[in-house]
């Protein structure tokens, strides 16, 4: 490797680590917000937690999550009907 390639590699690693740290900080911030909302629910029943797709929009597709929630509701409904 030439000196220029080594310098580019080091700069690339720095950028990569910075992006990973920013991503981790973003997740930590979101988690702290969710913990705060969960604690707020103890004091007031009007406070609710957002669905996971709303809390982490970059990781989950809202439509897929909504479909899974609907499927679970349908299963519960069918189970209640059977009883």
Image (cartoon, rainbow, N blue to C red):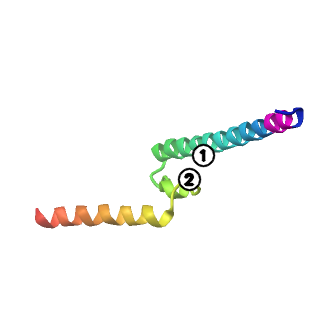
Q: Nearer the viewer, residue 62 or 41?
A: 62
Q: Is there any visible trace of residue 50 in the rendered image?
A: no
Where does the image place residue 35, in percent across and percent down from the top left?
A: 53, 41
Span highlighted in magenta in the image: 5-11
Q: Nearer the viewer, residue 17 or 79?
A: 17
Where does the image place residue 57, in percent across and percent down from the top left?
A: 57, 57
Where does the image place residue 40, in percent across and percent down from the top left?
A: 52, 45
Asked which secondary structure carries label 2, the reply is: loop
The residue positioned 84% from the left and 37% from the top of the image is 5
Where does the image place residue 49, in percent across and percent down from the top left?
A: 49, 52
Residue where numbered disc 1 is placed: 30
Q: Residue furthest left?
A: 83
Q: What secondary structure is the magenta-colored segment mainly?
A: helix
Question: Between disc 1 and disc 2, whose residue precedes?
Answer: 1
Left or right: residue 80 versus residue 37 is left
Q: Is residue 48 above or below residue 13?
A: below
Left or right: residue 25 versus residue 6 is left
Q: Disc 1 vs disc 2: which is toward the camera?
A: 2
Q: Quadrant of the N terminus?
A: top right
Q: Quadrant of the C terminus?
A: bottom left
Asked which secondary structure carries label 1, the reply is: helix
Left or right: residue 63 versus residue 18 is left
């Amino acid at each position: 490797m030439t000196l220029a390639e080594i310098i580019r590699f080091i700069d690339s690693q720095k950028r990569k680590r910075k992006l990973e740290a920013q991503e981790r900080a973003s997740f930590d911030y979101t988690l702290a917000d969710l913990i705060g909302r969960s604690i707020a629910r103890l004091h007031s029943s009007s406070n609710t937690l957002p669905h996971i797709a709303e809390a982490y929009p970059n990781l989950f597709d809202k439509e897929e999550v909504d479909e899974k929630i609907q499927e679970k509701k349908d299963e519960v409904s069918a189970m209640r009907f059977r009883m």
